[in-house]
Image: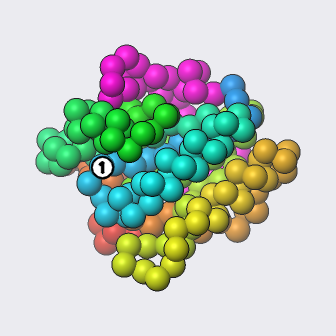
Amino acid sequence: MLPLGTAAPDFKLPECGGGEVSLVNVSGGKALLVIFMCNHCPYVKHVADHIKSLADEYMAKGVSVVAISSNDADKYPDDNPEAMQKEKSERGYAFPYLFDGDQSVAQAYHAACTPDFFLFDDQVKLVYRGQLDSSRPKSDQPVTGKDLRAALDAVLAGEKPSENQTPSLGCNIKWKEGNEPQYFNPQGTA
């Protein structure tokens, strides 16, 4: 996993609705939340409504939010930019939803799965990388966002989140052949 304290890796990616967004466009707030997600993953579908409400809530408090899809859109057309734009519109995401076609940004962040959450403080240094909460598809655990909310609340209070962080669990990022990073775990755990 990307070590805590790491500066946010730079990026400049196309937004699914047009234009480009870079790190400088989304940094500068009280915190920055970078979410690696996609459209087709059942783990993302399970928490998508909560991602939308959490993002709306914390964006109103000065947190910048950006989502990035790094999946191989040729093999997974539900994750191509046109499908991403449809998902963004239907779900009502107010944050940029970016397409990492060459998967270099996912590699730079050491993103492993969807969803995968990276929270940076106002100095754009990593303070949290982990799960939204303990809920999973077909589990009896409600989606609360407990883990990520605790980290966000700590940062907004000027504190550091606990370093005891549970890695996110979901579908592996769908790497293009030959793009699999060293940390790739084909068994499906983050």
Residue 113's image quarter? bottom left
Is residue 137 among what the camera can see?
A: yes
Foreground pick, 177 / 143: 143
Residue, far top: 19
Direction right: furthest residue:
158
Q: Which residue is mark 1?
A: 39
Residue type at mark 1 is Asn
* Residue at 49 percent of width and 34 percent of height: 94
Q: Is residue 167 above or below residue 105?
A: below
Question: In the image, is 112 to the left or to the right of 18?
Answer: right
* Residue at image coords 40%, 19%: 20
Locate the N terminus and report the quarter of the image it occupies.
bottom right
Q: Is residue 5 magenta?
A: yes
Residue 187 position in % (x across, y down): 31, 72
Q: Is residue 79 above or below residue 185?
A: above
Element marked by disc 1: loop
Q: Main secondary structure of the magenta part?
A: loop
Quadrant for residue 61, please give it: top right
125 left or right, relative to 102: right
In this rendering, position of residue 178 left or right of residue 53: left
Where residue 159 appears, as percent x and y from the top left, is 84, 50
**Magenta residues (range):** 1-27
Q: Residue at x 46, y 22 (%)?
A: 21
Quarter in which the C terminus is drawn? bottom left
Q: Of residues 74 and 42, which is closer to you in this image?
A: 42
Q: Residue at x 42, y 80 (%)?
A: 139
Where does residue 42 sit, x and y in percent of width and height? 31, 63
- Does residue 163 sit above or below 9 in this rendering? below
Whether residue 179 is visible to the viewer of this picture, yes or no, is no
Q: Position of residue 131 (x, y in %)?
A: 55, 63
Mark 1: few, some, or many residues within 10 Å (few <14, many ≥20)? many
With respect to residue 108, does 96 lie above or below?
Answer: above
